[in-house]
Amino acid sequence: MTGPSRPGPAAAREVAIVAFAQTRHRRATPELSEAEMLLPVLSEALDQAGLRPGEADFTCSGSSDYLAGRPFSFTMTLDTVGAWPPVAESHVEMDGAWALHEAWVKILTGEADTALVYAHGTSSSGDLRDVLTRQLDPYCTAPLWPDPVALAALQAQALIDAGETDEDALARIAARSRTAAEANPYAPLSGPVPAGDYVVRPLRAGDCPPVGDGAAAVVLAAGDTARRMRARPAWIRGMDHRVEPHALGVRDLTDSVSTRLAAERAGAFDAPVDTAELHAPFTSQEVVLRKALRLDDGVVVNPSGGPLAANPVMAAGLIRLGEAAARVHRGESDRALAHATSGPCLQQNLVAVLEGPERPARQERGPRS
């Protein structure tokens, strides 16, 4: 799907993120059901938008049955949005960022004016490193049981061998992210964090994300409805997602072609961005994404601390869009990029461009080619 100003049927409507809420992410939440975790988050997001429960035209969620350890677990969370009267609802077995993409398309096509999007993950239910091996190619890779840290370490070593980073540079990414997270009350990991021992060389504990439970929700709205709900909506100027080949052996792990293509189709390169929220769970993956997205030192990267400070699986990508939108809402950003990923070594990538009401940079550059 291309941005609204690209050719195609999606060019007619403006869509914005008008509300964002998240939990205070924690290592484990055994005392809460997923519905109990979600309810306050959904209430806060709907309150921000001035909507009552069940009033959104469309509801879409993202989660994983593998994390919950039971089939169709997402149906249990429908109690939080109101099981009666029936609502138009959908679910993706992915990070909530992809649920937001589905809701965005729903509004662009005119089938809805407002949408509630939420995501949740309870990584504490099992051994996350074992659970995530189920994403791998079932014939050649999964039987070897390489976990996500081992695969990210292969990617990090490839970057070091190519001369694109080193262990000191990775440590500086970790330190910068967790220093930024000191201002984020939702992040469980912030401030000075020791690099720690090697988990899988060359990645140390400090290069890896915290494991935790959490949830997030956003509200989307179209045109004048968005303007009534939020004084400064975060307009989605473009959004796209692409995927790398499933077989790791045919990929260049030091690059992310799918991220670059998604960014191009979302219009990210049409004008400079001032902020980027990157879903880079490992320090080495920020190196890959910065190159693919052409981010220089003038761009504020992960001012929330990013997934190195809070990484509730299945919600962490949606949170990147929410954090970027919140900076636009507060007037701290005029043009922000949000990125979400899923799968090993940045396999699937989604890029969105969010803007405030003013668009000076694009006007200076003239129309898109």
Image (cartoon, rainbow, N blue to C red):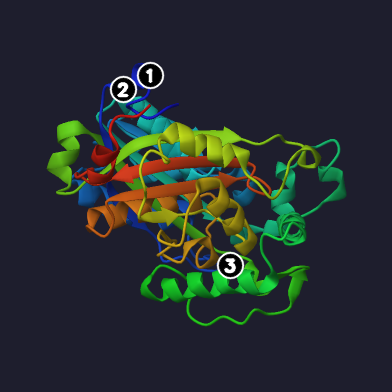
Q: Which residue is mark 3?
A: 210
Tell which residue pokes out farthest to the front in this image.
Answer: 365
Mark 3 residue type: Pro
* Residue ID at (45%, 26%): 1
The label number, if any, that marks residue 11 in the structure image: 2
Q: Secondary structure at mark 2?
A: helix
In the rendered image of this protein, does residue 183 appear above or below residue 111? below
Q: Nearer the viewer, mark 1 or mark 2?
A: 1
Residue type highlighted by circle 1: Pro
Point out residue 234 in the picture as x, y percentages from the top left corner. 27, 45
Residue at image mark 1: 7
Bin the neighbour count of mark 3 within 10 Å (Cα to Cα): few under 14, some 14-19, many 20 and up.
many
Q: Is residue 228 left or right of residue 198?
A: left
Q: Is residue 88 visible?
A: no
Q: Answer yes or no: do the residues labelled 1 and 2 have beta carbons within 8 Å?
A: yes
Q: Callout 2: few (<14), some (14-19), or many (20+) C-alpha neighbours within 10 Å? A: some
Q: Secondary structure at mark 1?
A: loop
Which type of secondary structure does the marked residue at label 3 adopt?
Answer: loop
In-image side of 368 versus 345 (left or right): left
Report the residue at 44% width, 45% height from top: 77
Tell me residue 200's x, y (percent).
77, 67
Badge nearest the viewer, 1 or 3: 1
At label 2, the amino acid type is Ala
Left or right: 8 in relation to 85: right
The quarter of the image holding the C terminus is top left
Q: CA–CA distance between discs 1 and 3?
A: 41 Å
Counting residues from the start of the chain, the first of labels 1 and 3 encountered is 1
Q: Is residue 177 visible?
A: yes
x then y, percent, for residue 287: 60, 58
Rendered residue at 57%/58% (across/down): 286
